[in-house]
Amino acid sequence: METKVFEPGSEIKERARIKSMEEYRALVEEANKDYEGFWGRLAKEKIDWIEPYKQVLDDSNAPFYKWFIGGKLNVSYQCIDRHLDKRKNKAAIIWEGEPGDKRIITYLELYYEVNRFANLLKNRFGIKKGDRVVIYMPMIPEAAFAMLACARIGAIHSVVFGGFSAEALRDRIIDAKAKLVITADGAYRRGKPYLLKPVVDVALAKDCESIEAVLVVRRNNEEIKWHEGRDYDYNELIVQESPNCEPEIMDSEDPLFLLYTSGSTGKPKGVQHSQAGYILWAQTTMEWVFDVKENDTYWCTADVGWITGHTYIVYGPLAAGATTMMYEGVPVYPDAGRWWRMIEEYRVNQFYTAPTAIRLLHKMGENEPDKYDLSSLKILGTVGEPINPDAWMWYFMKIGGGECPIVDTWWQTETGGHMISPLPGATPIKPGSATFPLPGIFAEIIDQEGNKKEPNEKGYLCITKPWPSMIRTIWGDDERFVKSYYSTCKKNGKPVYFSGDGALYDEEGYIWITGRMDDVINVYGHRLGTAEIEAAIGHHPRVAEVAVVGKPDDIKGESVFAFVVLKSDEGVADELEIMKEINKVIVKDIGPIAKADEIAFVPGLPKTRSGKIMRRILRAIAKGEEIKQDTSTLEDPSVVEKIIEVVKR
């Protein structure tokens, strides 16, 4: 395990909101002594209430917790209106399309755009408080306008990632019983236009009786089919609407949005988030973790179709009064310097991306960052999966110049915001560790009975006290909510939230995420985390990316099958030698029990367009089974056949 510690630099300490571990511990102690008082103080300080709450927490019907009882607010007001006195001419959103087209939207312009959109939803389509609206959009500003417009009138939005198939879109529409779909004709990806509207047409061809209309934003002006009486042109209609719309008064616990978790089998799970608790934590973590200041430019590279895009592109930055960036395309178009060029041009101060993207850019342009001035950067962040130490060091040295702290954030769709993360001005960082829980978050590594695990002993990563931005339920299925999150672990005899992840403490109390508890390989009765084996293989200097799965074995129970992408194709002829070297690294880092029985050197890994590796596809390939997953949502569907060819050799 990597043990080198990186202390925050003096410049970061000076500007940080939380400047030392002493200040961090004081906040933790405040939450320990008076939990409800701690959250009540934050809520009073950060939310512009229409009516104040009467009670901080109602835990009488656990795990259906309620926060800030009786409070009234509007999330779009929190994100826009309250900033107009001081920030009306400040850039709220900086957007760049993949072809290079650009838009800068000030807070006053955002106010007008969102109000017009809200009036359009109300006046033309009869959308009202509590109605569900599905947003199936590319990364264009209108996606953010649509989310905020729904929040303004009290409609519940469900953003569906624009790379999902018609079947996935249909499932989510049906489950939410949505009245309206907001989409675009298409967008640009890898230098070429692609179409979204035809996917909506296929999705609505059957079993979507709840849909009354489709609103289409024209992005690339491709030819599309229009269904008379159902499809409406946003660009034509929006100019007719008033730029003034009074925000709906919402209760703290009214639903704000649904977000369906991806990758699970069977019926999709609609994670339901509420108003006040969600926006409080989105804003607070923006301030604590990213330390965003008034004149900073902040960029999260995620898609609004995922929780990261919700919390850290739209709601969190805007609630904090920040300038947030949106980018439409891929990081390597037209070359591997695209992101670094944008950081230089816009003088980006905080940059937040996924380890998958970091590894890709490292592989495709290891020295590309040297061509650009990245000195504006103050803080780097990672999200989505544990980052291996080698990628961490490249990111730290090449992108951050060895000066920028990396906030390696652990959280989930269900948590609403960061749970475990370094604080840039306070936390000594160990590459690969998520470090410590944020103040007020009781994240613990325990066994199923609630006993805290000893250092280097794997356990269940649980949140043992409720928190404001937590999932409220699974839409329409309270029983599934309890079973999914509150049936595995207990503490003091009471069920607690189990994240699904395994983790361990090191000797200094740092938290290391070992991967999903179900992402384990049972070798000779020993449960080995795939993330741990992948991290070990990633230490080999020739390895760019790796995914590990288990394969049934008559003697061992399961054997280790590794899919490896090398940094270059040179020397693949000596793959037997590289296999031996990789296994030496595994033996050194984990032990002989974790040696890979089979290693396939492949040209790429099957990933969704958000960068998630589809290990179920790899498991099927390793077993020689038919692939049942929909591969149309992958970044490069053709890679699946290429992997199959390699494995069959």
Image (cartoon, helix red, strand yellow):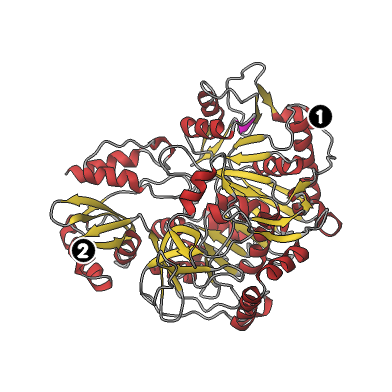
**In percent of the image, x 50 and y 32: which residue is there?**
171
Q: Which residues, given as a range, are shown in magenta?
A: 180-184
Q: Does 124 appear above or below 115?
A: above
Q: Nearer the viewer, residue 131 or 187?
A: 131
Q: Mark 1: which amino acid?
A: Gln
User: Residue 642: x and y, percent?
Assistant: 28, 41
Look at the image and say whether residue 182 sits in the magenta stretch: yes
The picture quadrant where one finds residue 544 is: bottom left
Q: Which mark sits nearer the N-terminus, 1 or 2? A: 1
Residue tagged 2:
595
- Secondary structure under tag 2 reads loop
Q: Nearer the viewer, residue 593 or 336?
A: 593
Does residue 260 appear anywhere in the picture?
no
Residue tagged 1:
240
**In percent of the image, x 21 and y 54: which residue is there?**
558
Residue 626 placement, left or right of 354: left
Look at the image and say whether residue 468 sits in the magenta stretch: no
Q: Mark 2: which amino acid?
A: Lys
Could you tell me what secondary structure mostly forms the magenta stretch? strand
User: Residue 16: x and y, percent?
Assistant: 66, 75
